[in-house]
């Protein structure tokens, strides 16, 4: 055997091996492949058909093995390719081994030799799962699109370059644009400069590699079609592709312009109220302080007049002088109370943990003689710690206990101080068995200089409960009174428990 014959045989073995490898590859493809000539005869199939071997179908007409519903359609496509030389494809519905309704993509391609179409290859691919997934996605998209297009909120989608790819019709009411006006435009074009600065940073964090959240909620301003800023409360969610890479953002924006205007108006009103209160408190302090000196002079000269000319005055004149001195004394007491009331709100907050039991015991010790003179029985629960100003809280207890003693049952005066834990704070109640008052006056008794009884019969200036209310509210709590005539009075107030105000 000469060298040329050896090379020829080697080449033949190579070609045979290559052909067998290609054949094995084709046989193991998931697709079904068929090659037919111009008369429709089958030249090649890559594997057996159902109930037929490859050898049994070779040379037969492809129509003999094709669903009758599609035989003529396939024949027309094959004829068209023989004439045009162009590829084609169709999607058909049929049966598979496992399911009744399967979907297939059939691709037709020419086999050309020397510029002439010699045969046509048909490649049939089972796309049932793909079609089902596309149908499910289509239904889902239709449902969410219907939802988005019927929402009053502005729904929008932008790609990773922040170009609008979807805009809901509600943008018309929100910003005055038609949806088509914004499609293809850059989202940042319709934001204020401040919003751009804020959101470029927020979106970078949302889509960055170190992202922890996939959505954010943020308030910012759009610019409407007329160039006016429009406040929005917007939730922005990161959209990712199948490889989990960011591909855009979904936003839902709600118009909160009216709310922002109301908040701004409320802020201005609060600032004005604070200024007004500050001026009023300053006026009360100054006025009270400046009234002290002339009042002191009136009181002192009346006392001198009474002492020096007492023997020369008639009984009626002495009575008039005593009335004037008593009035000056009460005016002095009212001014001092007014100064104290003013100091409550103007003094710096010096809050810390307060031992209520210690504060209450100190107050009861200071009031020892007053309590003994009244024969009052005072009982109290264990009181947990609170957060606040110990001196001001002590003043609350002093005023409430003093008030209860003043109006308690004269024969068996009883006062009970109880406590209830609210979790976030304490509810403290001071209950007496006194004369009580009409429930319609429950709010009135906390007003400054407001008294329900004649000052001729009881001491005090009607400022004690007003001070209590001011102190409790300054601590972030609340106070209320409950009572009925001849059934005693219950004053309840709340204080924060070990929490900073």
Image: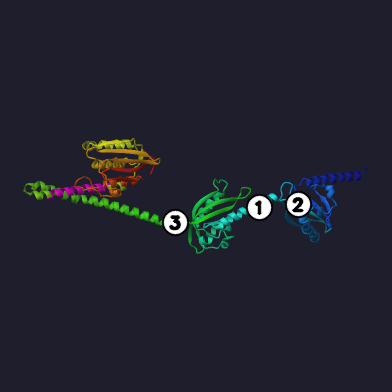
Q: Position of residue 84 (x, y in %)?
A: 79, 61
Report whether residue 341 is seen: yes
Q: Is residue 403 above or below residue 34?
A: above
CA–CA distance in space, label 1 to label 2: 19 Å
What SS does tag 3 mark?
Answer: helix
Query: Viewer-proximal residue, 457 or 216?
Result: 457
Label 3, on which residue?
260
Q: Position of residue 135 (x, y in %)?
A: 65, 53
Q: Position of residue 134 (x, y in %)?
A: 66, 52
Query: Viewer-proximal residue, 243 or 496?
Result: 496
What SS does tag 1 mark?
Answer: helix
Identify the image quadrant of the C terminus: top left
Earlier-in-chain disc, 2 versus 3: 2
Residue 73 is left or right of residue 492, and the answer is right
Residue farthest toward the right in the current orientation of the protein: 1
Query: Viewer-proximal residue, 316 or 434?
Result: 434
Label 2, on which residue?
124
Q: Residues within 10 Å of mark 3 (few under 14, many from 20)?
A: some
Query: Mark 1 and 2 residues: CB-CB less than 8 Å, in contact?
Result: no
Report whether residue 162 is seen: no
Label 1, on which residue?
134
Q: Which one is closest to the eye, mark 1 or mark 3?
A: 1
Which portion, as a residue range, is magenta? 320-340
């Amino acid at each position: 055997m000469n060298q040329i014959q050896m090379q020829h045989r080697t080449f033949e073995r190579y070609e045979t091996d290559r052909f067998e490898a290609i054949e094995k590859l084709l046989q193991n493809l998931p697709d079904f492949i068929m090659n037919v000539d111009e008369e429709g005869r089958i030249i090649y199939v890559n594997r057996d058909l159902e109930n037929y071997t490859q050898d049994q179908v070779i040379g037969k007409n492809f129509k003999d093995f094709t669903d009758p519903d599609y035989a003529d359609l396939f024949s027309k496509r094959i004829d068209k390719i023989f004439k045009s030389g162009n590829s084609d494809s169709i999607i058909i519905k049929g049966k598979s081994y496992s399911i009744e309704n399967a979907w297939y993509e059939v691709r037709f391609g020419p086999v050309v030799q020397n510029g002439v179409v010699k045969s046509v290859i048909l490649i049939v691919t089972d796309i049932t799962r793909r079609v089902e997934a596309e149908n499910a996605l289509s239904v889902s998209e239709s449902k969410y699109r219907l939802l988005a297009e019927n929402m009053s909120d502005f729904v929008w989608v932008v790609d990773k370059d922040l170009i609008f790819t979807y805009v809901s019709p509600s943008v018309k009411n929100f910003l005055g644009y038609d949806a088509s006006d914004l499609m293809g435009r850059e989202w940042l074009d319709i934001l204020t400069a401040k919003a751009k600065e804020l959101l470029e940073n927020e979106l970078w964090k949302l889509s960055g590699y170190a992202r922890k959240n996939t959505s954010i909620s943020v308030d910012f301003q759009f610019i409407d079609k007329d160039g006016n800023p429009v406040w929005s409360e917007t939730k922005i969610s990161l959209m990712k592709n199948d490889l989990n890479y960011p591909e855009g953002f979904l936003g839902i924006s709600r118009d909160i312009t009216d709310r922002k205007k109301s908040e701004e108006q409320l802020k201005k009103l609060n600032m004005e109220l604070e200024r007004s209160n500050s001026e009023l408190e300053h006026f009360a302090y100054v006025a009270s302080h400046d009234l002290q000196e002339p009042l002191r002079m009136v009181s002192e000269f009346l006392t001198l007049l009474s002492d020096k000319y007492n023997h020369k005055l008639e009984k009626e004149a002495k009575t008039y002088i005593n009335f004037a001195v008593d009035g000056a004394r009460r005016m002095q007491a009212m001014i001092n109370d007014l100064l104290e009331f003013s100091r409550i709100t103007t003094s710096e907050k010096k809050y810390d943990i307060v031992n209520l039991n210690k504060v209450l015991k100190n107050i009861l010790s200071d009031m020892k003689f007053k309590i003994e003179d009244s024969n009052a029985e005072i009982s109290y629960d264990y009181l947990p710690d609170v957060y606040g100003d110990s001196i001001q809280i002590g003043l609350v207890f002093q005023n409430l206990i003093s008030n209860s003693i003043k109006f308690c049952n004269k024969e068996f005066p009883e006062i009970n101080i109880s406590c209830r834990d609210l979790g976030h704070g304490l509810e403290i109640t001071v209950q007496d068995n006194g004369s009580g008052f009409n429930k319609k006056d429950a709010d009135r008794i906390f007003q400054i200089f407001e008294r329900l009884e004649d000052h001729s019969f009881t001491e005090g200036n009607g400022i004690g409960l007003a001070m209590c209310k001011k102190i409790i509210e300054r601590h972030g709590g609340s106070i209320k009174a409950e009572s009925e005539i001849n059934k005693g009075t219950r004053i309840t107030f709340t204080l924060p428990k070990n929490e900073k105000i």
